[in-house]
Image: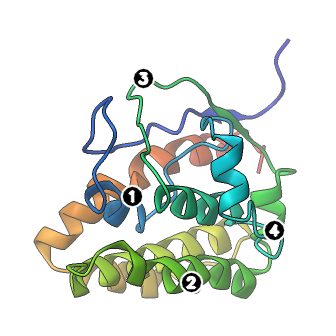
Amino acid sequence: MGQEGDWDSGGARCRAGDLPFQRPSCLNDYLFQNFIAVPAPTIRRDAFLQVGGLDSRLWHTADWDLYFKIGSVGNVYYHSCPLACYRIHKHSLGMQGSRNIEDFRRQHEIIIDRHAGKLSPSITNQTLRIAKASIDVNTALAAAVGGKLDQMAKAVSSVLALGPRAIRRYFLYSRIVERTFPRLRALVKGNL
């Protein structure tokens, strides 16, 4: 008998295929959403130590921060076949921590503030606008799981303000649809 909850395999999208991806192409899109499932990466110890490991002040986004730091010191390979998944349930760190919506938002903003300027001199204003809209969506969805719907209008407005091309890019690289369905299933089953 399995544990109660729904599963998300990550389902990352990266333009690189199974080759080392070129900075900034995939990292710029990675700024929209951490699409790497926590149990999925294999990281060289020397690279982990070189970048200072995980930032213990980041309870929700420490892995996202780490992957950006690792990506800045060497090649990153992306394997397109899902090899790991994680269980979505109400007792997970992400679900418990997202109860404090302002801190949850700040965790995401820290990543944008730390890494947007490092990615590419050609990083566009559009990329930053999409990343900020993604924060609005993630925050609104986290609040909605806690029964607070007051941030949904801002999230929808942020996405619509991007315009058609940027909305397409947001939906393609944020994986919002793929990430939302397992959480909705868990919510309907009463697991969130």
Q: CA distance from mark 4 to mark 2?
A: 16 Å
Q: Earlier in the sequence, mark 4 or mark 2?
A: 4
Q: Which mark is residue 81?
A: 3
User: Pointers 3 and 2 in contact (CB under 8 A)?
Assistant: no
Q: Which mark is residue 109?
A: 2
Q: Earlier in the sequence, mark 3 or mark 4?
A: 3
Q: Nearer the viewer, residue 164 or 29?
A: 29
User: Pointers 4 and 1 in contact (CB under 8 A)?
Assistant: no
Q: Earlier in the sequence, mark 1 or mark 2?
A: 2
Going 41% across and 78% down the picture, which residue do you hit? 118
- Identify residue for label 1: 174
Going 25% across and 44% down the picture, which residue do you hit? 15
Q: CA distance from mark 3 to mark 2?
A: 30 Å
Q: Residues within 10 Å of mark 1 (few under 14, many from 20)?
A: many
Q: CA distance from mark 3 to mark 1?
A: 18 Å
User: Pointers 3 and 4 in contact (CB under 8 A)?
Assistant: no
- Identify residue for label 4: 97
Circle 3 — which element?
loop
User: Pointers 4 and 2 in contact (CB under 8 A)?
Assistant: no
Report the side of 136 relative to 87 (left or right). left
